[in-house]
Amino acid sequence: MTEMRRLIAGNWKMNGVGSALTEAEALAEALKAGPAAMRVALCPPATLIERLARTVEGSAVEVGGQDCRAEASGAFTGDVAAAMLADAGAGLVILGHSERRSFHGETDADVAAKVGAALAAGLEPIVCVGETLEQREAGQAVTVVQAQVAGSLPDALIGKAFAVAYEPVWAIGTGLTPTVEQIEEVHRAVRAAMVERLGETARKAPILYGGSVKPSNAAEILNTPEVGGALVGGASLKAADFLGIIRAA
Ligand code: 13P
């Protein structure tokens, strides 16, 4: 396992057809000209993974999926297995995103099973946690994310490369962000829960912040203690915006 390197990952969510590959191409070209100090990844819809992987081949841009099924294969219409993502060219996979948890009812146990499948396929998981506005207002942000960490990270992660992403649900796509003090508080709590769950090797895994990250707030967020990178939604769709975040880091 290598030392922790900061990771800036773009989550395109359900956005983008073939024409969006020009943005990936522009990003790859820009990073060739001026390499970033950290790892950079794009996680497009599954239909674009293979083409995007070809587009950025030879550049520093890594490729990830947005979800996988826990089972390796079978009668699961519409779902994608971890090995299929890897076969298409992905090296990473986002798991347990709040949109999966809310729209697809994914539990911590479901997420943990998917993490196991991802590791078995050689993928590096990015496991998402985060509280709702209601939970934050009730003073439960730390306990909620610590419980999600405890339930979503299986033993199989010990000694493996992975990341956790703290994405407060109320900050996703809203333009709202926590204060840096709030981000630091939760990231420290996430770290403590990771170490409790997996032991000291969990200190090597970066904790990404996600939720309305943009070029104008990236430097402040990325320089907060225990922030090991960012998971970026809307601002990763355009190469210029995403580069603004990468350059600010
Ligand atoms: P936004 O950056 O659009 O708020 O999305 C964050 C996110 O959900 C990334 O996974």
Image (cartoon, grey):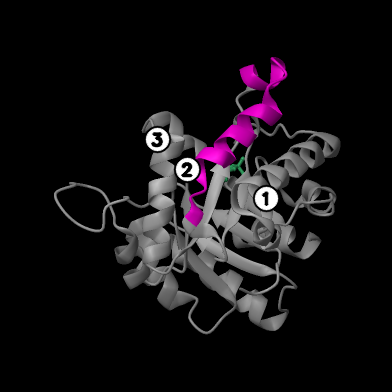
Q: Residue 195's x, y, as percent? A: 67, 50
Whichever of labels 1 and 3 marks the residue nearer the N terminus, that label is: 3
Instruction: Evaluate whether residue 27 shows in this view.
Output: yes
Residue 95 or residue 111, whichever sits in front: 111
Q: Residues in magenta?
A: 134-155
Q: Is mark 1 within 8 Å of ligand 1?
A: no
The residue tagged 1 is 195
- What type of secondary structure mainly makes up the magenta span? helix
Give the CA distance from mark 1 to mark 3. 24 Å
Q: Is mark 3 within 8 Å of ligand 1?
A: no
Q: Residue 154's x, y, as percent? A: 48, 50
Q: Residue at x 59, y 58 (%)?
A: 9
Q: Nearer the viewer, mark 1 or mark 3?
A: 1
The residue tagged 3 is 106
Q: Which mark is residue 217?
A: none
For the C terminus, the quadrant is bottom right
Q: Is residue 148 above or below residue 36?
A: above
> How many badges with numbers are in the image?
3
**Quarter of the displayed picture in which ligand 1 can be seen:** top right
Residues tagged 2 and 3 counted as in contact (Cβ below 8 A)? yes
**For mark 3, does the 10 Å Cα neighbourhood hold few (<14), some (14 to 19), or many (20 or more) residues?**
some
Q: Residue at x 83, y 39 (%)?
A: 180
The residue tagged 2 is 96
Q: Residue at x 84, y 51 (%)?
A: 225
Give the CA distance from mark 2 to mark 3. 7 Å
Whichever of labels 2 and 1 marks the residue nearer the N terminus, that label is: 2
- Helix, strand or loop at disc 3? loop
**For mark 1, does the 10 Å Cα neighbourhood hold few (<14), some (14 to 19), or many (20 or more) residues?**
some
